[in-house]
Amino acid sequence: SFTAHPKRDPKTQDVYAYGIEKSLGLNLKVYRLSPQSGRLTELYSISQDKAFVIHDMLLTENNIVFVIAPLYMNLWDMIQ
């Protein structure tokens, strides 16, 4: 999955986004897209022990803040 709400840095014009990689585990991936070069760079990969619902993020001058509700999905229960 990939965010529907990317954020643009007003100073650099870089676009920041995130997605959830589903493989043997779950990983929150954070990306930066540079409009100057057209390159998409993976900045972080953060392992998740549960499938949290992440709908949006906030971009500050120094941080990316994820809005994570105290709710998670049990993927095993969903496929049974």
Image (spheres, rainbow, N blue to C red):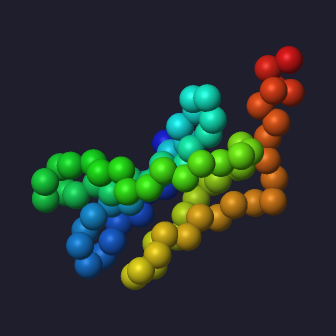
Q: Residue at x 27, y 64 (%)?
A: 14
Percent coordinates x, y for residue 18 in the rendering:
48, 51
Q: Nearer the viewer, residue 66 or 3?
A: 66
**Residue at the far top in the pictured view:** 80
Q: Is residue 68 left or right of residue 76?
A: left
Tell me the quarter of the picture where residue 60 sits.
bottom left
Rendered view: 24 above or below 34 = above
Tell me the quarter of the picture where residue 33 sits.
bottom left
Rendered view: 11 above or below 51 = below
Q: Nearer the viewer, residue 26 or 10?
A: 26
**Can you see residue 3?**
no
Percent coordinates x, y for residue 80 in the rendering:
86, 17
Q: Residue at x 65, y 64 (%)?
A: 67
Total marks shown come to 0
Percent coordinates x, y for residue 26 in the rendering:
62, 39
Q: Is residue 32 left or right of residue 64?
A: left
Q: Is residue 16 left or right of residue 11?
A: right
Q: Residue at x 63, y 54 (%)?
A: 55
Percent coordinates x, y for residue 2 in the rendering:
49, 42
Rendered view: 46 above or below 58 = above
Q: Nearer the viewer, residue 17 or 26?
A: 26
**Residue at the far bottom in the pictured view:** 61
